[in-house]
Image (cartoon, grey):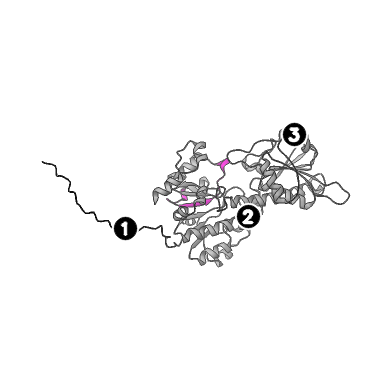
C-alpha cells in the first residue's frame, strides 16, 4: 500500500482558545465527627460548643459522642444547643467523613475508621507504632497532625498555645510542691521583702521556657535560662522585655546552678526523636533536698536522667530527696483552657475547608497547611516517619498536583 503524502495547506488559520482559570469551587457542607477520647488521661476536646455553633450556622453537620466534652466541663446540653447531634454509639461518630480528635489515633479506633476519611488529631511520635501507621495507610486516610500544622505566619499555632499553657502551668505546679503541706522545702515561690528570692533554673528557651520565665519573674523569683541556641536566648529576652541571666548549656555551669536552685524546669524541645539528656543523675544527686524538678519534655523522653513518666493521679516521686514532677501532656490538666485554644485554630480551618469545597481544594490553595499532613489518601507524606519506619515516602506537592 503506498504511503499517503502529507497534505500541506498554504493558509493556516489560528483560533484563540478560552483561558482556563482556577476558579474557586462552590462551598461544601461537611460532616464532622468528634469522638469521646479514651486515651490515657486525655481531658481535652478539639471543638468547644461556641466553635460548633459557628460551624452549624455555616451549614456544617457536627456529630458528637455522648459526654465527649465532660472532662473539660462542656456538657452535652451545651453542644446540642449549639446545633450538634449527640450520639451514644461510638461507631456512629466514626462514620463522619471528617474526624476531629484531641488524642492520637489508637489501636481501638482502627476497626471503626472509614475508607478515605480525613482525620485531624495529634500524633505522639514517641509512642507511634509502625503497625498502626500501616493500618491507617490501608484505609487510604488523609491525616493532619496538630503538631505540624502551620499557619500563614509560618508558626505552629496549636503547639504554641499548648506550650504557653504548659509554661505558665509549670510555675503554679512548682509553687504547690515547694509548700510545706506537700513535703517541699517550705519556701514561697518568688520572694518577699527582706528575704532572698527563690531561684529558678529553666533549661530550654523555647515557648515553654519563655512562659515559665514570665510566670516566675511575675512571682518575683530569680530566673536563669539555659539553651544552646543563642538566637532563642536573644528572642526570649526581647519577648520578655528585659535582661535575664542566660547561658549556653555547659555541664559544669549547669551543675553549679542546679546545686543552689529551688526549681529546675526541663523545657527542651526536639524536632525529631527524643530530647537530649542534659542533666545527669549525678547533677540531680547534688541538688538540695526538697527542691522541685519539672520535666516538661517528658513527652519526648525528658531531659533529666532521673525522670520517669508519672500521671495526673500520682504526679510526683522522690529521688535523692528531689521532688520530680513528670506528667506528660500538662495542658490536659487545664483541659478547658486547652480545648478553647485548640478550637480557636481548628474552627477557622474547618470553615475554610468548607468554603473551598473540601480539604483537597484547601491544600491546593493554602500551601502552608501541607506541612501538617502526614498521610494523604493513604500515601505517607512525612519524611521523618518514612525514615523511622522504613516506609515509602511520597512527595505531597507532587501528589496534590497530580490530582488536579
Q: Position of residue 97 (x, y in %)?
A: 45, 55
Q: Which residue is the site of mark 3?
A: 283
Q: Earlier in the sequence, mark 1 or mark 2?
A: 1
Res 169 seen here = no
For numbered disc 3, what is the local secondary structure?
Answer: helix
Rendering quarter of residue 335: bottom right
Q: Indicate whether 392 appears above or below 32.
A: above
Pair 1/3: label in front: 1
Separation of marks 1 and 3 at Cα, in angstroms: 75 Å
Seen as rendered, the residue at the extreme left is 1
Q: Callout 2: 10 Å neighbours few (<14), some, many (20+)?
A: many
Q: Callout 3: 10 Å neighbours few (<14), some, many (20+)?
A: many
Q: How many marks?
A: 3
Pair 1/2: label in front: 1
Give left or right: position of 116 versus 290: left
Q: Position of residue 311 (x, y in %)?
A: 66, 45
Magenta residues span: 111-127
Q: Indicate whether 254 appears above or below 169.
A: above
Q: Callout 1: 10 Å neighbours few (<14), some, many (20+)?
A: few
Give left or right: position of 71 versus 220: left
Dot label at residue 338: 2
Give left or right: position of 72 versus 258: left
Dot label at residue 174: none
Q: Indicate whether 60 appears above or below 105.
A: below
Q: Indicate whether 13 appears above or below 104.
A: below
Q: Which residue is the site of mark 1?
A: 17
The answer to which of 337 and 129 lies nearer the viewer is 337
The answer to which of 366 and 38 lies nearer the viewer is 366
Q: Earlier in the sequence, mark 1 or mark 3?
A: 1
Is 126 included in the stretch rendered in magenta? yes
Amino acid at each position: 500500500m503506498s504511503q499517503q503524502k502529507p497534505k500541506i495547506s498554504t493558509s493556516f488559520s489560528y483560533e484563540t482558545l478560552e483561558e482556563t482559570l482556577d476558579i474557586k469551587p462552590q462551598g461544601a457542607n461537611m460532616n464532622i465527627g468528634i469522638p469521646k477520647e479514651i486515651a490515657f488521661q486525655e481531658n481535652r476536646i478539639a471543638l468547644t460548643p461556641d466553635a460548633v455553633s459557628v460551624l452549624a450556622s455555616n451549614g456544617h453537620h457536627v456529630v458528637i459522642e455522648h459526654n465527649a466534652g465532660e472532662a473539660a466541663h462542656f456538657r452535652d446540653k451545651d453542644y446540642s444547643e449549639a446545633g450538634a447531634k449527640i450520639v451514644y454509639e461510638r461507631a456512629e461518630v466514626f462514620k463522619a467523613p471528617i474526624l476531629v480528635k484531641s488524642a492520637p489515633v489508637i489501636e481501638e479506633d482502627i476497626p471503626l475508621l472509614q475508607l478515605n476519611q480525613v482525620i485531624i488529631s495529634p500524633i505522639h511520635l514517641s509512642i507511634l507504632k509502625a503497625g498502626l501507621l500501616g493500618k491507617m495507610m490501608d484505609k487510604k486516610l488523609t491525616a493532619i497532625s496538630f503538631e505540624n500544622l502551620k499557619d500563614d505566619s509560618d508558626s505552629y499555632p496549636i503547639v504554641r498555645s499548648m506550650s504557653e499553657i504548659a509554661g505558665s502551668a509549670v510555675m503554679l505546679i512548682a509553687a504547690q510542691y515547694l509548700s510545706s503541706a506537700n513535703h517541699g522545702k517550705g519556701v514561697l515561690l518568688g520572694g518577699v521583702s527582706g528575704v532572698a528570692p527563690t531561684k529558678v533554673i529553666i533549661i530550654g528557651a523555647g515557648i515553654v521556657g519563655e512562659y515559665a520565665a514570665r510566670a516566675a519573674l511575675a512571682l518575683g523569683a530569680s530566673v536563669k535560662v539555659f539553651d544552646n541556641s543563642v538566637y532563642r536566648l536573644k528572642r526570649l529576652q526581647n519577648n520578655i522585655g528585659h535582661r535575664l541571666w542566660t547561658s549556653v548549656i555547659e555541664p559544669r555551669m549547669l551543675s553549679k546552678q542546679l546545686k543552689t536552685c529551688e526549681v529546675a524546669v526541663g523545657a527542651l524541645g526536639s524536632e525529631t526523636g527524643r530530647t537530649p539528656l542534659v542533666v545527669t543523675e549525678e547533677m540531680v544527686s547534688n541538688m538540695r533536698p526538697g527542691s522541685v524538678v519539672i520535666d516538661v519534655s517528658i513527652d519526648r523522653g525528658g531531659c533529666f536522667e532521673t525522670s520517669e513518666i508519672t500521671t495526673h493521679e500520682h504526679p510526683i516521686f522522690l529521688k535523692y530527696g528531689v521532688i520530680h514532677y513528670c506528667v506528660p501532656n500538662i495542658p490536659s490538666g487545664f483541659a478547658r483552657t486547652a480545648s478553647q485554644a485548640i478550637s480557636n485554630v481548628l474552627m477557622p480551618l474547618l470553615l475554610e475547608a468548607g468554603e473551598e469545597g473540601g480539604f483537597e481544594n484547601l491544600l491546593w490553595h493554602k500551601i502552608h497547611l501541607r506541612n501538617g499532613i502526614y498521610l494523604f489518601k493513604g500515601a505517607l507524606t512525612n519524611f521523618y516517619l518514612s525514615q523511622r519506619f522504613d516506609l515509602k515516602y511520597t512527595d505531597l506537592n507532587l501528589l496534590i498536583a497530580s490530582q488536579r
